Amino acid sequence: MKAKLLGTLATSLVLAASVAVPALAGPKEGGRANVVIQPEPPGIMTGIVQNAPAQMVGGNIFESLLRFDTELKPHPQLATSWEISPDGLTYTFKLHPGVKWHDGKPFTSADVVFSADKFLRETNPRTRASLAHVETITAPDDLTVVFKLKETFGPFIRMFEAGTLPMVPKHIYEGTDFKTNPANNTPIGTGPFKFAEWVKGSHIRLVKNPDYYEKGLPHLDEIYWHVIPDAAARSVAFETGKIDILPGGSVENFDVARLAKTKNACITDKGWEFFAPQAWLWFNHRQGVTADARFRKAVSYAIDRKFAHEALWNGMGKVSTGPFADSTAFRDESALVKYDYDPAKAKALLKEMGYKGEVIRFPYMPYGETWQRWAEAIKQNLEDVGIKVELIATDVAGWNKKMGDWDFDISTTYLYQYGDPALGVSRAYVSTNIAKGSPFNNVGGYANPEVDKLFAEGATAFPDSARQKAYSAVQKKLSEDAVYAWLIDLKFPTITHCNVKNLITTGIGVNDGFKEAWIE
Amino acid sequence: MQTLWFLSSRLVKGILVVLAIVVLDFFLIHFAPGDPAAVMAGESGATDEIFLQQLRVKFGLDQPLMTQLGLYLWGVVRLDLGYSYRQQMPVLDLVMDRLPATLILTGAAFVFSLVIGVAAGAWAAANKDRPLDRAITTISLIFYATPLFWMALMSVLVFSVWLDWLPGFGFEEVGNTDNVFERVLDVSRHLVLPAVTLGLFFTAVYVRMTRSSMIETARMDFVKTARAKGLTEGVILRRHVLRNAVLPVVTLAGLQAGQMVGGAVMTETVFAWPGIGRLMYEALLQRDYNLLLGVFLVSAAMVVVFNILTDWVYRLVDPRIEVAR
């Protein structure tokens, strides 16, 4: 039965692959896309609100200088070309001429300088961290911007993506309190769609930008984002044809195989390459048996990742073998110590360390049914080798608190790696990122000066071959120490009706706007 | 004069009750683990200490708890229920935005359950121990015992997915029409499944209560007198039995009406109905303190108001009841 379901999914994936290729007849103009948005975001001004649903809607309104394909190679967006100086310290961007904000004012290099140097430094923690490497941002003329770095910073070019460095209008925000500016509720960007209305609790409506600078785009007339809070109701809305697009994570994983078999359903796992979400099991390195590397290795051997990958994740994504996700740059398979499913090895390690049946507290991530079932599967795996586990149920706020207070022994989690170890991997491992009270740093408390040094080297080394050397060494060290139990390099299925074409065209997926999408 | 005294004393007591509820809720909510800043920061996918602190300062969470309570109560007195951290709107605006949808849903469910419940209960009582009575009693027992969420999902499956008769989610077909009549029709179609689902439980309660109350009343001496006077069974049932038997139903209806404004969390969530219940549920998960308190306050106030109204209706239904002082 499982093989049959996976077969159906595989067929659907093949079908979906064709989605990215425009049909010979050419795109059909007009029409409306009905999409699910869950949860309803607090706002869609992505310079202020960075959660996933905000980015999904805001990606149609706001743009950055570049886009990234599934290989994470940069492509022009608001910048037509860019140059990196031989020493890796100066990035010069030439902007697209004739671009207008949705209110008709021209977009210029002054907007880029304002967005990066003022606005996002204040509002976006992720952008702020990367901009710490920047010395000056200047605009020699209206269509040129120059970023001068203090030191080389390998992933710098990857910042210029709509979610990380969205361009915001200087003429609207300069001199105001960015977070309370009324324009946050009626956002103005340069993107292919304009904001039309937001009926809280019901829907958000975007309409085609007729003055969009890329001729012939977008194809759709409008997009409706429907707020449907119940996962089962979202499935039904898709089945009954009220919804055309279910972005990744809209429905529970156990419903995916069934929906994939419904009439006119296409499914793809593309569009997560840039974010590269990886799921792993935190260990609390500060206390108890989880501080012992032998115990961590035993747990790593005891978990049947292949089962979870097939049964809980419908075979999407890949089983993790190390701390760098599959599509993250500088991943080096040859450097890794691997922990394949081997309960006998786990038992031997537990015996060697003298594990006496201490109960392991496991407040699992409360992100829905799939994560709960996964926690139950892990508990069963661990109990099979003799480890006693107490599952602790929480809600999101309670879980954040427990993790921030280090009140756990093990816990599931996942984080985006943003394509580069300096952007999304090091934060979970370096000792400088340990701080009580925050649930989003190195909450496991792993501290190793050698690892700190290698991550620092990897971030600023130049050229890439030097970065690779540091990152290969860090992967070796982290896997030797079994710092955490890496589980699955996740990919979330985007389910659409098959008449929705060309929806996902980049490594950023549905967050990169629907400008090339059309409905047959 | 007596009426005026009744109303003013009830109002003062009501205001005190609502304030006590607000204070209690305030502490309960703040004792739940986690805070809204961490939830919002978590949703951002990445954060740092500066960002968390910015959020806490913005929401006033860096102030001592008693200061926060004082500021909140001072706001309530001025009818300012604060600002929703998560929804980025004033709480009062949010509650007022969602109130109409909730009132339409719960009002429809209320009328549906009351009319069908009392009618079916009276019908069952008039046919006591006959097959019709047994059928009505059994069906109402099934509705009484079935979990609401299951009923909601099944009704969507049958009427929306299989039969395609009625829409399964939302308040209306968005962006389809600007014609008022067509919109009313559209909202009505969307209303059927959630209102009936929500109303079925109370329908069952009214059926059982009306039936037993009528059977008990029918044994009273004044009914025998009416029958001796030569009145027809229909008149006896309608004018004498039903009117006297309806008092417990009024009590229950008062309770249901009070809960109406609190919304129907489960129904609104399953049917994506943009009402207060859903707002409350989301606010709870996101630890959106101000919003949660605002919804609680409005609900508590409405329960108090409906309690006063229920007492008032008692007098109309049965003039023998004196107004309590």
Image (tube, rainbow, N blue to C red):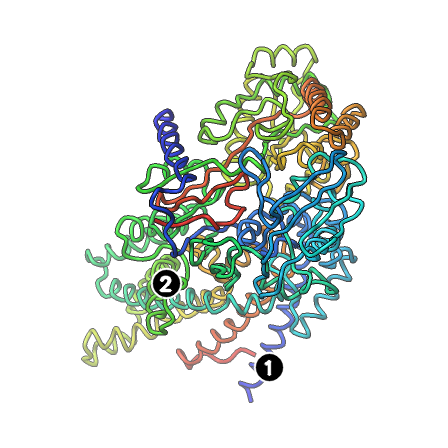
Q: Position of residue A190 (x, y in %)?
A: 58, 57
**Which labelled disc corresponds to residue B8?**
1
Name the front one of labels 2 and 1: 2
Which residue position is annotated with label 2?
B191
Residue B196 as seen in the image, left or right of residue B36: left
Could you tell me which chain the residue with mark 1 belongs to?
A: B
Seen in the picture, residue B104 relative to A458 is either above or below; the reply is below
Secondary structure under badge 2? helix
Q: Can see residue A516?
A: yes
Q: Chain of mark 2?
A: B
Q: Nearer the viewer, residue B146 or B323?
A: B146
- The quadrant where residue B132 appears: bottom left
Residue B211 in the image, given as x and y percentages of width and height: 31, 63
Q: Residues within 10 Å of mark 1 (few under 14, many from 20)?
A: few
| Residue type (three-letter) at the residue carrying disc 1 | Ser
Instruction: Look at 21% across and 81% down and name the residue there.
Output: B229
User: Which of the pair A97/A134 is nearer the observer?
Assistant: A97
Q: Where residue A259 sits: x, y (%)?
A: 37, 40
Q: Secondary structure at mark 1?
A: helix
Circles 2 and 1 in contact, beta carbons < 8 Å:
no
Left or right of A511, for residue A451: right
* Amino acid type, mark 2: Leu
Q: Looking at the image, which residue is at 56% across and 16% down? A: A340
Q: Is residue B145 above or below residue B314?
A: above
Q: Is residue A303 left or right of residue B222?
A: right
In this rendering, the answer to whether B44 lies above or below A210 is above
For the residues marked 2 and 1, what is the alpha-carbon distance in whole angstroms? Answer: 37 Å
Evaluate whether residue B146 shows in this view. no
Residue B236 picture location, percent across and down:
24, 75
Q: Indicate which disc, 2 or 1, sits on the residue closer to the N terminus.
A: 1
Which corner quadrant of the image does residue A467 belong to?
top right
